[in-house]
Image: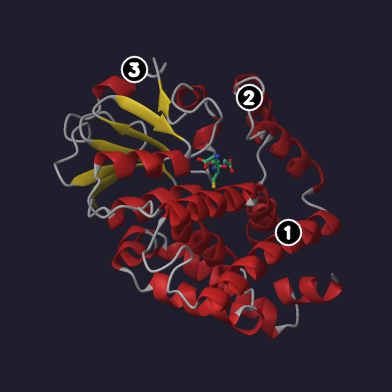
Amino acid sequence: MARVDHPQSPLVAKLRGVHLFGFDGAPCSQRVSFALAEKGLRRARSVPWRTDTPRSLEAPEGSYVFRNVSLIKHDNLSEAYAAIQPHLVVPALVRDGTLFVESMEIIDTLDEMWPERPLTPTAPVAAALCAELVERGKALHRSVRHVTFRWSLGRLGKTDRVTAERARAIEAAGSPEEVAAFYGRFNGDAIDPETFVHHLHALEEGYREQDGRLAESGAPFLTGSSFASADIIWAIKVLRLRECGYPFARRFPHLEAWYQRVSRRRGFREGVLRNHRLLHHAFRAKAAVEHWFGGGIRRAMRAA
Ligand SMILES: N[C@@H](CCC(=O)N[C@@H](CS)C(=O)NCC(=O)O)C(=O)O
């Protein structure tokens, strides 16, 4: 359920227009930034997430305010943020005091709010395929998290003991995201090579399926001739692994050609890449250096 009734944070009720609580380097947040840009909403300003100056509370028509929740500083593992997203993750979106969570459900909600330029196919068969591919993408989200943390963040992703304990205390009981448990394991011994390879394989299986689908259909997008939310979730999944140096062009040429098509979209350039330049280039540079020295994700693939 995307909509959250009676949010605990007093900030939510004060917000007018559209506000996205997110982190530009995080795939789930990138999905929503991408969708907002596809809907033609531009980012009016970016502020630290708790900012409540009169100017920051109001997003002008046709735009949104980006409320940065730094995952590097672990802003999300705080009581104040838990009052907005009790699962301690980004994104969350507020429109005129109403709070929505869950990236793909937020995107469906945006489709209802701005029905022109739909992100859900109108034909029933394509719509069913879109829903299936979105679910497939969601199921692989943990794999992206494991690969990202081991490959790109390494020790930088760890929290201190106090933060880890606070996360355990404030995370909603039975949270499907299991953020506190993840940090508990990650802080202890990072992610062992077997777990890493397991998740890398899971992602490769997903990429192989989409590559085959595109080869077979010859269509420009995953669900046919129109761009849809399935393209959003999968493009973001490809983006992160490309940043890690994964050789898509060699392994999955149809998926690569599709990604090139999607990444040329204005929504992708303005909603995702423009805001994520720093980390994007840092990841790409790291991957290039590793590759140069014969290591990195390609060696992990060979070892697998
Ligand atoms: N099911 C959620 C998953 C959200 C999620 O896992 N977000 C990640 C970033 S992609 C996050 O905030 N992680 C917290 C952390 O890494 O500390 C959604 O799709 O919105």
Looking at the image, which residue is at 57% across and 78% down? 215
Residue density around tag 1, few if under 14, some if 14–19, many if 20 or more, within 10 Å: some
Mark 2 / mark 1, whichever is N-terminal = 2
For ligand 1, tell me if the residue under mark 2 lies within 8 Å: no
Residue in the picture at 78% in, 40% down: 185
Quarter of the figure with residue 37? bottom left
Q: Quadrant of residue 114?
A: top left
* Residue 137 drawn at (x, y percent): 58, 53
- Which amino acid is tagged 3? Pro
Query: Residue 214 shows which numbered tag?
Result: none
Q: Which residue was labeled with disc 2?
A: 166
User: In the image, 92: left or right of 174?
Assistant: left
- Residue under label 1: 202
Closer to us: mark 2 or mark 1? 1
**Are there few (<14), some (14-19), or many (20+) residues within 10 Å of tag 2?**
some
Of pointers 3 and 2, the one earlier in the residue sequence = 3
The answer for how far apart the CA atoms under marks 2 and 1 are is: 31 Å
Q: Decide: is 180 above or below 187.
A: above
Examine the rendered structure and indicate whether residue 98 appears above or below residue 245.
Answer: above
Q: Which residue is mark 3?
A: 10
Position in image of residue 280 (x %, y %): 48, 66
Q: Assign the C terminus to one quadrant of the image.
A: bottom right
Q: Position of residue 228 (x, y in %)?
A: 40, 58
Q: The disc labelled 2 sits on which kind of residue?
A: Arg
